[in-house]
């Protein structure tokens, strides 16, 4: 296990085309870090740079004590789980896990011991003789993780490993990943575009946008104090409402809006869409400011919502303010 | 067909049976002719049932060729044909698979240029470049050698192209996973690419075996010595001048012998062959 440092890490394919614009982060030993962002934001590129599958155009990546910029992936002491698992189709589950160990020249007994142990942890013992083709998606995912575990690396790298699974399996694998991390305590970097995965798995997360780290912090901290309008709009479903007010942007989460008497109204919605979800009800509408800003409010399910005007208010402590030009948070 | 009408079924079967007969009848005549004496098959009409000379005819051509035409033993020709039909596909595959590996998995200056150079040679089959090629082989004194018979036919854009297309269907992550596992490029080649290419190789082998076995023009020019005749050339050399002078029973026996190995290869490798053409193991 090891700490990982990203120091002003940059990536450009040509002088004009820069995709990572200098990312800084200190990852503590044993931490579970999620890199979150929309597609094309450079999150996978950043991970692949840590893995050594992409060259580093600027800055340094340090794993443990070593600067790994010019090391081959095999010398970086990392293991990677790919989105499509990338299992060797012609090898059995056992051989898939053992392949890297054989190349490293470990003894037969040691390989057998490590693979059996990983198979035990991941409940793959029954399938060791099977080919990947004969496994379900979730089992293949586990084999891919097993291949990473047996190497006993300093750092695990996950590149959207759950996105090829169906929704139910994804929730289950998420839980297994968490349990695995608790058990092994290996430093992990996990790339995803799914905010639920990020919120549930991360000890800390990096929200990336267009090759920049918009915000780095613990999930709830990021949720509670988004550093920019991008983060405010990306995390939370529905996202934070952003309303132009007094030359600034006011941000309020849908769940912080509560219905009130018209006399106390801080905002008045022209309701045009109601989505009852059971646990609560989402109400969408415009506010009459001429700019037709669209607003969402999360109301308790026991309050029947109806079309027409809806007066809402929010506690001032739940209001966030952003600079409309830069999109950055204005600290009050 | 969606409809299930009796007369349609009968009609389609009739057409298919006619087609089979049209292809099978000449083969049957060839076989029948190879089992009779020369006098018997020269009668009109020719017998359509096998005669009693099967053993005599085949043992004669295998050991001593014909009496009036070429006297080279067909056994030696079968050996020559086999060598040619094995060396060509194996050589082609060995060269093409490495060439495609380089083109697909490595970035080097002129990569696309070399790919297109290989691709362009598709337009230059043996027949087009036969005179300069013959000159080269003659200057190198490779006439009447296995090297002279096979090397000019080994260069192959088709196989390179086929392997390239196959490699491009293998997900990049597989190569990256192998890299993270610590496999060197050649290790990845042997441990992952070769096993995955098995079915493609089998399909290619069948096609190229038949291609090598059926070569006519090139061995006709290069194999002028009796000991280097291939079976196909052997048939040609047995036919001398006028129709009456040819021992058709022996020639037909040789023709049957020439047809058997490719047929056997296709039958034995059919399962792999079809798999290689239609399915990729991923």
Image (cartoon, coloured by chain):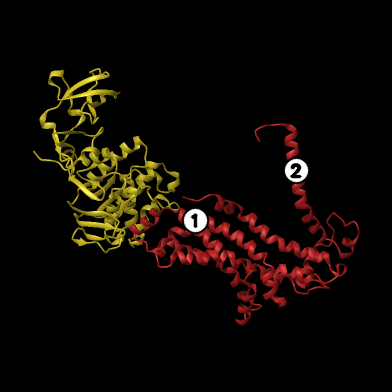
Chain colours: A yellow, B red
Quadrant the N terminus of chain A occupies: bottom left
Residue A177's x, y, as percent?
28, 43
Q: Residues within 10 Å of mark 2 (few under 14, many from 20)?
A: few
Task: Residue at 83% x, 73% y: name it.
Answer: B68
Q: Quadrant of residue B259?
A: bottom right
Quadrant the C terminus of chain A occupies: top left
Q: Which mark is residue B15?
A: 2
Residue A196's x, y, as percent?
26, 37
State whether residue B3 is above or below residue A155: above
Is residue B56 visible in the rendered image? The answer is: no
Residue B139's x, y, as percent?
61, 82
Residue B76's x, y, as percent?
70, 72
Q: Quadrant of residue A134?
A: top left
Give me the chain letter of mark 2.
B
Horizontal arrangement in the rendering, residue A17 relative to residue B75 (left or right): left
Is residue B12 visible in the rendered image? The answer is: yes
Task: Please name whichever residue, B254 or A289, is drawn nearer the observer in this view of the structure.
Answer: A289
Q: Earlier in the sequence, mark 2 or mark 1?
A: 2
Write down the residue under mark 1. Answer: B166
Task: Please name whichever residue, B106 or A112, is drawn nearer the observer in this view of the structure.
Answer: B106
Task: Residue at 43% x, 49% y: name it.
Answer: A129
State whether residue A205 is above or below residue B191: above
Cα gap from disc 2 to disc 1, whole angstroms = 38 Å
Task: Residue at 21% x, 38% y: name it.
Answer: A232
Task: Please name whichever residue, A83 or A208, is drawn nearer the observer in this view of the structure.
Answer: A208
Q: Are marks 2 and 1 on the same chain?
A: yes
State whether residue B234 is above or below residue B4: below
| Element class at badge 1 | helix
Task: Please name whichever residue, A28 or A114, is drawn nearer the observer in this view of the structure.
Answer: A28
In the image, farthest residue toward the left: A332
């Amino acid at each position: 296990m090891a700490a990982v440092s990203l120091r002003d890490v940059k990536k450009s394919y040509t002088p004009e085309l820069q995709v990572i614009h200098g990312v800084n982060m200190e990852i503590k030993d044993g931490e579970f870090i999620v890199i979150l962002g929309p597609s094309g934001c450079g999150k996978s590129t950043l991970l692949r740079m840590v893995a050594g599958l992409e060259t580093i155009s600027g800055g340094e990546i340090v794993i443990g004590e070593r600067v790994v910029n010019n090391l081959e992936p095999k010398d970086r002491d990392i293991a990677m789980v790919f989105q499509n698992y990338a299992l060797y189709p012609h090898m059995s589950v056992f051989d898939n896990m053992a392949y890297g160990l054989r190349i490293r020249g470990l003894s037969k007994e040691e390989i057998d011991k490590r693979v059996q142990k990983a198979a035990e942890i991941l409940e793959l013992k029954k399938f060791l003789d099977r080919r990947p083709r004969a496994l379900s998606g979730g089992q293949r995912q586990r084999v891919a993780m097993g291949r990473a575990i047996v190497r006993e690396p300093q750092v695990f790298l996950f590149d959207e490993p759950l996105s090829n699974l169906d929704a139910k399996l994804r929730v289950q694998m998420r839980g297994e990943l968490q349990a695995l991390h608790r058990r092994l305590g290996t430093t992990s970097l996990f790339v995803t575009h799914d905010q639920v995965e990020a919120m549930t798995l991360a000890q800390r997360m990096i929200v990336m946008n267009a090759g920049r780290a918009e915000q780095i912090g613990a999930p709830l901290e990021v949720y509670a104090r988004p550093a920019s309008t991008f983060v405010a709009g990306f995390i939370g479903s529905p996202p934070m409402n952003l309303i132009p007010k007094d030359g600034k942007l006011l941000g309020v989460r849908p769940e912080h809006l509560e219905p009130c008497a018209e006399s106390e109204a801080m905002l008045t919605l022209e309701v045009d869409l109601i989505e009852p979800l059971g646990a609560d009800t989402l109400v969408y509408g415009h506010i009459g400011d001429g700019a037709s800003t669209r607003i969402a409010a999360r109301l308790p399910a026991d309050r029947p919502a109806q079309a027409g005007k809806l007066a809402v208010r929010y506690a001032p402590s739940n209001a966030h303010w952003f600079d409309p030009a830069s999109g950055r948070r204005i600290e009050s | 067909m969606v409809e299930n009408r009796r007369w349609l079924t009968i009609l389609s079967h009739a057409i298919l049976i006619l087609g089979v007969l049209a292809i099978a009848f000449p083969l049957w005549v060839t076989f029948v002719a190879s089992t009779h004496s020369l006098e018997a098959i020269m009668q009109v009409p020719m017998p359509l049932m096998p005669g009693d000379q099967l053993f005599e005819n085949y043992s004669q051509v295998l050991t001593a060729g014909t009496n009036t035409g070429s006297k080279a033993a067909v056994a030696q020709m079968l050996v020559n044909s086999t060598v040619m039909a094995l060396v060509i596909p194996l050589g082609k595959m060995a060269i093409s698979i490495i060439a495609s590996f380089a083109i697909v998995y490595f970035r080097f200056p002129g990569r696309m240029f070399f790919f297109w150079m290989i691709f362009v040679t598709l337009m230059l089959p043996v027949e087009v470049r036969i005179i300069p090629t013959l000159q080269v082989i003659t200057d190198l004194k490779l006439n009447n050698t296995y090297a002279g018979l096979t090397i000019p036919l080994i260069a192959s854009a088709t196989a390179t192209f086929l392997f390239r297309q196959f490699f491009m269907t293998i997900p990049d992550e597989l190569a990256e996973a192998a890299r993270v596992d610590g496999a060197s490029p050649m290790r990845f080649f042997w441990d992952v690419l070769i096993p995955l290419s098995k079915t493609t190789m089998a399909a290619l082998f069948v096609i190229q075996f038949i291609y090598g076995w059926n070569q006519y023009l090139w061995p006709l020019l290069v194999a002028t010595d009796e000991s280097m005749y291939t079976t196909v050339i052997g048939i040609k050399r047995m036919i001398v001048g006028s129709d009456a002078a040819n021992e058709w029973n022996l020639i037909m026996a040789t023709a049957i012998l020439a047809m058997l190995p490719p047929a056997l290869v296709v039958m034995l490798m059919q399962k792999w062959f079809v798999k290689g053409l239609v399915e990729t193991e991923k």
